[in-house]
Amino acid sequence: MSIQLGMPQPREEAASLPSAPAARPADAPAGLADRYGRRATDMRLSLTDKCNLRCTYCMPAEGLEWLAKQAVMSAEEIVRIVRIGVEQLGVRELRLTGGEPLVRHDLVDIIAALRSNHPGLPISMTTNGVGLAKKAAPLKAAGLTRINVSLDSLHEETFTQLTRRPFLNQVLAGVDAAWAAGLGPVKLNAVLMRGINDAEAPSLLAWALGRGYELRFIEQMPLDADHGWTRRNMITAAEIRELLSTDFLLSADPRARDGAPAERFEVRRRVAGSADDAAGPVLGTVGIIASVTEPFCSDCRRTRITAEGKIMSCLFSREEFDLLGLLRSGASDEALAQRWQDAMWIKPKAHGMDHVGLDAPDFVQPDRSMSAIGG
Ligand code: SAM
Ligand code: SF4
């Protein structure tokens, strides 16, 4: 069961971690700071828990029980929460996600309102791309900066097996439309599943490089509603690098990572029979988001708001703190900012997945799926 308290409480952390104060001290740093010296500036806001795909690593085949309409943040509430984040708490970057953000009928209006309030704010969106072909140009016109589209396979059958919906062509049309509308650099997210699409990693990368898209592989995380994830079965970052090495040479991208979840590599094609340094020119970059095996918690800059306005300091938090309820009770901007700061102050040091046996009984998977949190 999720704990949904009015006031933040300390999370139960791994025994090896130091115990922490429950309350944010008066002299805590400004903004969305935590006890470990991090400050969240990157806001992930979920617009809806609904989705029109059923990716096996995220949702069950039968879907989930959707939130009631009135439980979900309205456009006005979203706009106010983002304004508080940006104006009072140091948020510098916003990503809209879900569920599937494109299923929200007022999406373009929300983006236009956010853009009008925050002319310089980078606003990006993560989408499955279904229906994007029609919406890409209006989204750009409304002020969306950039887009990430999830694409796990270029083969119709495999795509349908993974998403349980036959929409590959729609997604491909959406990716191209996003590029044409100026929503670049277009990033593609792929989750590799053993025995299903893992062998496709090099051809997926070749396809993305050929079109100037930046592909990012995301390690499968234990955030599926079916609780089918296992450590043994997930494809690790090390395996992804190995899979790609048959066709490509990867070298560390010299640009600073700067808190980004993806570790980026420059990609050159491997020239058959040649030494590494005889390989061809840099074709582009690939990212690997290794949340499970090479976590980046110590440099995490994210704060999350779920579709029903709950603050989550970490994808793996088992506590959520109600911002929307407080807002609807008539609270001031200052009171809302204070609750957000309190919730972030007790952000856990790390999700702990890297140092416990994940198949062991002491690893407790969050109750919510990725779609319900907002990935
Ligand atoms: N529906 C949109 C989409 O799929 O792009 C946005 C929400 S989705 C939850 C955001 C990202 O989370 C997607 O790129 C998806 O592949 C990824 N994702 C979902 N479940 C995951 C899991 N169990 N492990 C790793 N990534 C996951
Ligand atoms: Fe929907 Fe995205 Fe989850 Fe797939 S990953 S089921 S598209 S929310």
Image (cartoon, grey):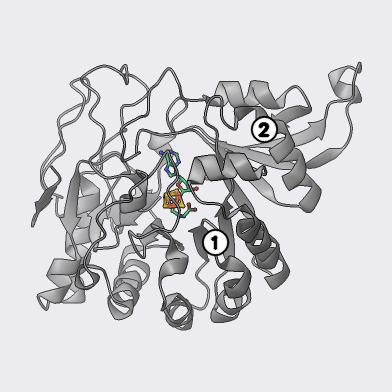
Residue 147 locus on image (x, y percent): 57, 61
Ligand 1 is within 8 Å of the C-beta of the residue at disc 2: no
- Residue 307 horizontal side relative to residue 328, left or right: right
Q: In this image, 63 relative to 151: left or right?
A: left
Number of residue marks: 2
Vertical comparison of 227 with 107: above or below = above
Q: Which residue is located at x 27 percent, y 71 percent?
A: 73
Identify the residue at horizontal 91%, vertical 18% (top origin): 274
Location of residue 154 with respect to 321 vertically, above or below: above
Q: Which residue is mark 2?
A: 200
Q: Secondary structure at mark 1?
A: loop
Q: Label 1, on which residue?
A: 130
Say if 249 sits above or below 89 in the image.
Answer: above
Q: Quadrant of residue 271?
A: top right
- The picture places residue 371, in percent across and down from the top left corner, at 36, 51
Amino acid type, mark 2: Glu
Label 2: few (<14), some (14–19) or many (≥20) C-alpha neighbours in 10 Å: some
In contact (CB < 8 Å): disc 2 and disc 1: no
Residue 335 in view, yes or no: no
Look at the picture and state if 263 lies above or below 45.
above
Question: 351 or 270: which is nearer to us?
Answer: 270
How many residues crowd around disc 1 within 10 Å: few (fewer than 14), some, or many (20 or more)?
many
Measured from the top left, where is residue 28 in percent x and y?
Answer: 22, 51
Quadrant assignment for the N terminus:
top left
First of labels 2, 1 by sequence position: 1
Q: Quadrant of residue 326?
A: bottom left
**The one of 219 and 131 positioned closer to us in this rendering:** 131
Disc number for residue 270: none
Q: Is mark 1 within 8 Å of ligand 2?
A: yes
Element type at mark 2? helix
